[in-house]
């Protein structure tokens, strides 16, 4: 009972206490940002920004179904009224004309600043004659009825012009009983925009709860509410990841504890055996919290796999420690004989995980750090703390039968070890003849949103006339004025493309708010009162209206000539405010203008050609101080994922190289290194062929899984390397059985840890689990079978 | 067999010329019509203008709530009312609005739509109807029920023969008035 015996235990206890404090105070998140990489190109950066914070990310689409039309309309109005009173929501649209009066008043008041028709030509005698002539023709039509009351003030029809220019395609949803409904009229539709950033999942969750509460607070009719949109997906994904992490970790923990109990038949041994694992998990969380500031739920999910690997260390110690008992000492013999091998195995695993650290995918980088910290902690606790906690004379006999069983099972394999070389051949043939693409190149492959939910989202989006934004021009400048001017210059060019049929249409922030420069030009286009009066008299000479009737027009034009210009603040309370907020965004001291383009739909080749024309138009754009980028969101997301897959391939290759170099240095022999690595590569190729046969497209996480097969499997391979393990172990049949037993047990724990993950409904987790679980098992079998016979 | 046919023919013939005896009767007959095609001429008398405006074109109706007005002269325009949603195509422009958002337009269009559909409930919701008929035809006069509506329209007068509407006269509160005459076209 000398102090040094307790020093490591005391140190460990202090570290655990400190770590527990850090872990308890760490910030945990489970949103989708773990799936969004840091983006290398401008277009991809914009894509990620849009996915994370854009107006699309902030919008929630609601749908009220069931009951009858009037009931749905009543519930829609009631829900909208409650949500409009809630500051979480920037806008709540359900087809009710809440801003209509304000909109009309605003548009009418500022018509000579807002209308695209205002040019000097418009106010020449010919221009006036044409515009007023058209206006008179319109008076006979129902839309003219709208204009009739305004005609004496607005005979040139600017108000209608602006209304048409704000909704150029007339795509608003239809209304029934005063609210928006789907084309078949069977559901009421609402569009809600959150005030918070799209990436703020906590705020999104609060908002969704507020929507549900607001709906439930309505009457008790049979109508039901459904929600969709990126914010809904983010909250669902977080909920699912959170639930799965808890569920899967519990299942694998229970399964591993049960297995250890069966094998050890000692509660004390199980508890002691789990100490390194728990210490490792804690260390992992602390490292990630300190290194990244925030811990992703997905990282904890991957962490479940750490249980599978870290438990191995204590298994080796506990199962094999009785060997030293025979020598009458403590576990010192174990330290001498097995620790170097375990340490080397641990280092190879760390090499593999270290390759993930520079990944642009935050989920992967965190997984790497978590695993490295976890493995080091688990290894240190196993080496320095666990032996000191073992009671004197601690012994387990139970590793032996498991080892004998494994040895018996391996006999035929070892006999036919040459035949094993057929495996890579078969796998190679399978891979060579595999027709379908082996790798999935869609970012969607990682999305935790189910296809059913994605389909519902698409359906509702189409019904609300919210176009699927695929191509957009992004303008960036220092001031809103610079961005607005650039969008106007580009708009002129885009109008030509619309006229040529290259584009169906486009949106622009300057439709809602013209730049100061354009407003000034429009003011300058308004003639002085005398000039206008003379031209008007000439213009209406042939028209069925007396010029005296249009005196109010002359007054309004005169007032507009030196009236105040319209700014962002003037839009408050109108639907134009919502429109401009979606397309003109301030971020830091930068202003971003978005111009979504609607390309003509006639085949992908034509679309590509049309996009090329848009790109040329953009290159010819002269807009000082503004950077313009054309973003094809689909292409950007695909290139993003491809780049991301290429990066992962490179990192995995580096990880593999690091492992091989480490082994070569430690083993000081190329042959021995090759012998250790060969069974691991065999396992990887076999798993790969398995996926090809199963027809499952591989994603980035399968790739990471393959690296882990090598990292984890190297532990087994090293034990079968004769020179690494003490000769005595293999010469003593009982010791050999214990070694095999501990390996089998360790392997089973790993297979359970990853195997449970394979059943996750979160694609990233299931991909990793379904790769590593069979891979680890194969790595053990191949290592044992290919080991040189004793 | 022959006699049955003769009676059926007679019944048909008499029903075709018989005028509706009551508003209910007219509405029931109108409600049975599924499609209608007609040409129209419209004259608008606006206080604002020195001369009336005239236009002409086609009317197409599908029960219960699709009404299309295709103006051919003087300027082509296509107006489509469907499920309370109004779409106007003129030149390259499309104007889209919900009837409920346009109280200046709604009473005119909806009175015609409700009459065509034989939707007496909808008609009586906004107007007080007065129905008259004799051997030559029928007339239906609609007077607004609410002050809000009366501020826009003072009365609407329709006349027709059998289950056909032949004219619609609308008097607005501000003194403007319009007359649309309708001629049935054979179904295509």
Image: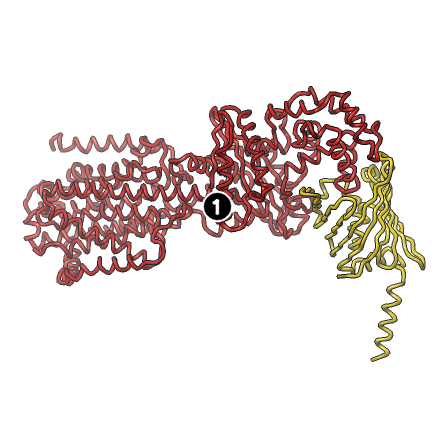
Residue A243 seen from this side: yes
**Display colour for chain B:** yellow
Q: Within the image, what quadrant is residue A579 found in?
A: top right
- Which residue, given by chain and number where applicable, does mark 1 sit on? A608
Q: Residues within 10 Å of mark 1 (few under 14, many from 20)?
A: few
Q: Is residue A759 left or right of residue A191?
A: left
- The quarter of the picture where the C terminus of chain A appears is bottom left
A598 or B83, which is in the foreground?
A598
Q: From the image, state the color of chain A.
A: red
Image mark 1: chain? A
Q: Position of residue A448 (x, y in %)?
A: 42, 46
Disc 1 element: helix
Residue A461 in the image: x percent, y percent? 55, 46
Q: Residue at x 81, y 53 (%)?
A: B39
**Image quadrant for the N terminus of chain A?**
top left
Q: In the image, B68: left or right of A408? A: right
Place of residue A263 in the rendered image (x, y in percent of width and height, measured from the top left): 20, 53
x then y, percent, for residue A262? 23, 53
Q: Nearer the viewer, residue A697 or A514?
A: A514
Query: Compared to B38, does A166 lie above or below?
Result: above
On the image, which quarter does residue A486 sit in? top right
**Residue, x 54% and y 48% (percent of image)?**
A601
């Amino acid at each position: 009972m000398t102090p040094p015996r307790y020093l490591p235990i005391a140190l460990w206890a202090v570290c655990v206490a400190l770590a527990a404090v850090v872990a308890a105070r760490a910030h945990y998140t489970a949103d989708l940002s773990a799936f969004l990489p840091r983006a290398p190109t401008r277009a991809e950066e914009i894509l990620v920004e849009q996915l994370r914070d854009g107006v699309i990310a902030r919008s929630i689409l609601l749908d009220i179904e069931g009951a009858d039309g009037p009931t749905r309309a009543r519930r829609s109005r009631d829900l909208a009224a409650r949500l409009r009173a809630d500051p979480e929501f920037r806008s709540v649209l359900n087809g009710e004309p809440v801003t209509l009066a304000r909109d009309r008043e605003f548009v009418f008041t500022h018509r000579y600043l807002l209308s695209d028709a205002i040019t000097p030509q418009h106010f020449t005698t010919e221009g006036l004659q044409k515009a007023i002539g058209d206006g008179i023709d319109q008076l006979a039509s129902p839309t003219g009825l709208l204009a009739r009351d305004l005609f004496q003030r607005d005979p040139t029809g600017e108000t209608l012009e602006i209304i048409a220019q704000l909704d150029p395609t007339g795509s608003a949803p239809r209304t029934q009983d005063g609210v928006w409904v789907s084309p078949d009229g069977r559901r009421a539709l609402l569009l809600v925009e959150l005030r918070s950033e799209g990436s703020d999942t906590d705020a999104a969750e609060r908002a969704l709860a507020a929507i549900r509460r607001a709906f439930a607070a309505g009457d008790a009719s049979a109508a039901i509410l459904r929600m969709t949109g990126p914010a809904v997906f983010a909250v669902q994904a977080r909920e699912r990841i959170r639930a799965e992490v808890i569920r899967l970790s519990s299942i694998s923990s229970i399964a591993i504890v049960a297995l250890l109990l069966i094998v050890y038949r000692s509660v004390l041994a199980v508890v002691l055996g789990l100490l390194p694992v728990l210490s490792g998990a804690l260390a992992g969380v602390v490292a990630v919290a300190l290194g990244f500031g925030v811990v992703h739920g997905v990282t904890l999910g991957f962490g479940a796999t750490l249980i599978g690997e870290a438990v191995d260390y204590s298994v080796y110690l506990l199962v094999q420690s009785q060997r030293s008992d025979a020598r009458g000492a403590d576990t010192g013999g174990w330290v001498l004989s097995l620790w170097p091998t375990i340490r080397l195995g641990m280092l190879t695993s760390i090499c593999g995980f270290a390759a993930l650290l520079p990944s642009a995918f935050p989920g992967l980088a965190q997984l790497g750090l978590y695993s490295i910290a976890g493995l080091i902690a688990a290894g240190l606790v196993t080496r320095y703390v666990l032996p000191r906690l073992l009671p004197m004379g601690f012994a387990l006999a139970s590793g032996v039968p498991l080892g004998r069983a494994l040895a018996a099972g391996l006999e035929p394999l070892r006999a036919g070890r040459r035949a094993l070389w057929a495996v890579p051949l078969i796998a190679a043939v399978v891979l060579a003849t595999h027709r379908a693409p082996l790798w999935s190149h869609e970012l969607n492959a990682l999305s935790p949103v189910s296809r059913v939910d994605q389909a519902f989202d698409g359906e509702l989006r189409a019904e609300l006339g919210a176009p699927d934004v695929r191509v957009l021009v992004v303008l960036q400048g220092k001031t809103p004025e610079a961005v607005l001017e650039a969008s106007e210059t580009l708009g002129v060019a885009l109008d030509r493309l619309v006229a040529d049929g290259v584009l169906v249409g486009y949106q622009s922030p300057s439709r809602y708010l013209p730049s100061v420069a354009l407003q000034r030009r429009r003011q300058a286009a308004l003639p002085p009162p005398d000039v206008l009066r003379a031209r008007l008299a000439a213009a209406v000479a042939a028209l069925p209206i007396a010029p005296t009737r249009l005196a109010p027009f002359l007054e309004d034009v005169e007032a507009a000539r030196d009236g105040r210009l319209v700014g962002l603040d003037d839009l408050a309370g109108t639907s134009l405010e919502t429109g401009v907020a979606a397309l003109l965004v301030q971020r830091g001291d930068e202003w971003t203008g978005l111009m979504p383009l609607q390309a003509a739909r006639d085949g992908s080749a034509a679309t590509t050609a049309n996009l090329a024309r848009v790109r040329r138009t953009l290159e010819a754009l002269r807009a000082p101080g503004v950077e313009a980028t054309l973003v094809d969101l689909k292409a950007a997301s695909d290139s993003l994922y491809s780049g991301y897959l290429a990066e992962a391939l490179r990192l995995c290759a580096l990880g593999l190289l690091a492992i091989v170099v480490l082994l070569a240095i430690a083993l000081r022999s190329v042959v021995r290194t090759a012998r250790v690595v060969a069974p691991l590569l065999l396992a990887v190729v076999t798993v790969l062929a398995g996926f090809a046969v199963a027809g499952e497209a591989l994603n980035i996480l399968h790739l990471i899984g393959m690296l882990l097969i090598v990292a984890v499997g190297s532990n087994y391979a090293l034990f079968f390397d004769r020179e690494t393990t003490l000769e005595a172990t293999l010469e003593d049949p009982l010791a050999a059985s214990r070694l095999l037993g501990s390996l089998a047990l360790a392997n089973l724990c790993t297979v359970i840890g990853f195997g449970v993950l394979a059943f996750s409904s979160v694609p990233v987790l299931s991909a990793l689990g379904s790769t590593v679980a069979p891979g680890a098992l194969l790595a053990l079998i191949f290592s044992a079978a290919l080991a040189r016979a004793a | 067999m022959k006699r049955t046919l003769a009676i059926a023919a007679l019944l048909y013939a008499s029903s075709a010329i018989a005028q509706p005896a009551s508003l209910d009767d007219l509405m029931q007959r109108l409600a049975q019509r599924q499609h209608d095609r007609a040409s129209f001429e419209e004259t608008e008398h606006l206080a604002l203008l020195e001369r009336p405006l005239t236009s002409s074109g086609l009317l197409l109706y599908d029960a219960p709530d699709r009404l299309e007005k295709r103006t051919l002269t003087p300027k082509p325009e296509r107006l489509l009312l469907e499920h309370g949603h109004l779409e106007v195509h003129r030149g390259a422009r499309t104007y889209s609005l919900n009837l409920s958002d346009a109280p200046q337009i709604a009473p005119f269009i909806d009175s015609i739509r409700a009459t065509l559909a034989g939707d007496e409930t909808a008609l009586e919701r906004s107007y007080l109807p007065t129905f008259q008929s004799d051997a030559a035809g029928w007339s239906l006069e609609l007077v607004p029920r609410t002050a809000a509506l009366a501020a826009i329209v003072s009365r609407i007068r329709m006349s027709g023969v059998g289950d056909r509407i032949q004219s619609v006269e609308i008097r607005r509160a501000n003194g403007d008035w319009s007359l649309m005459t309708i001629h049935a076209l054979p179904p295509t």
